[in-house]
């Protein structure tokens, strides 16, 4: 399966919605996100994981919470491979990008798409 989202605001929006579970807020709904913490009030969040390595590693942390481990290979073409940690029922999922941030984002979206496909088959 190939992710059909270009690097930039569209990819950032897809990650915020599908991986992070956030909701768009305000006029610039593909850029500004409302992030709510259980013990704190929600606040606005400018989220650009396709550009910021700090934000990309927040995606990696979210994937770890969901039971996936990231191996990032930077030898030639940045490659992100996610491995399921708990059940190991799914094959590793890899994605490539021009930057490490893009590879992490594409990989996370591929995992979400594969999980959705498995859940729809099982339903």
Image: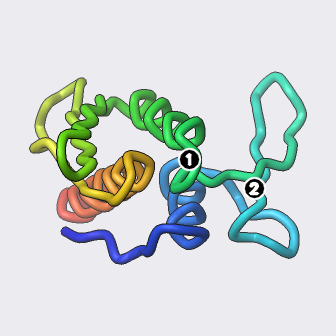
Q: Could you classify mark 2 by the number of other residues whose Cα lies within 10 Å: few (under 14), some (14-19), or many (20 or more)? A: many
Report the front residue among 90 and 6.
Answer: 6
Horizontal and vertical percent for residue 111? 30, 51
Task: Name the residue carrying label 1.
Answer: 20
Which numbered disc, 1 or 2, marks the residue that appears first in the sequence? 1
Horizontal and vertical percent for residue 46? 75, 52
Answer above or below: position of 75 versus 44.
above
Q: In which quarter of the image is residue 29?
A: bottom right
Residue at 89% in and 34% down: 41
* Residue at the outermost front position: 76
Answer above or below: position of 119 versus 28.
above
Residue at 33% in and 30% down: 67
Specify the label residue 92 is tagged with: none
Q: Could you classify mark 1 by the number of other residues whose Cα lies within 10 Å: few (under 14), some (14-19), or many (20 or more)? A: some
Report the front residue among 75 and 17.
Answer: 75
Residue at 85% in and 40% down: 42
Measured Cα–Cα span from mark 1 to mark 2: 10 Å
Q: In which quarter of the image is residue 9?
A: bottom right
Answer above or below: position of 120 versus 37.
below
Left or right of 39 on screen, residue 92? left
Report the front residue among 84 and 54.
Answer: 54
Specify the label residue 33 is tagged with: 2
Residues at discs 1 and 2 in contact (Cβ within 8 Å): yes
Left or right of 34 on screen, residue 106? left
Residue at 58% in and 41% down: 55
State the SS at label 1: loop
Residue 119 visible here = no
Horizontal and vertical percent for residue 101? 44, 48
Residue 44 visible here = yes
Report the front residue among 63 and 80.
Answer: 80
Horizontal and vertical percent for residue 86? 23, 24
């Amino acid at each position: 399966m190939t992710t059909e989202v270009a690097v930039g605001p569209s990819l950032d929006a897809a990650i915020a919605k599908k991986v992070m579970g956030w909701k768009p807020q305000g006029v610039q709904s593909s850029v500004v996100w409302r992030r709510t913490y259980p013990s704190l009030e929600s606040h606005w969040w400018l989220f650009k994981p396709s550009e910021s390595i700090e934000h990309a590693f927040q995606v990696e942390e979210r994937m770890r919470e969901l039971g996936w481990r990231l191996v990032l290979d930077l030898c030639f073409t940045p490659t992100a491979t996610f491995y399921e940690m708990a059940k190991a029922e799914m094959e590793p999922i890899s994605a490539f990008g021009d930057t490490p941030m893009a590879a992490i984002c594409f990989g996370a979206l591929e995992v979400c798409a594969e999980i959705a496909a498995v859940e729809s088959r099982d339903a």
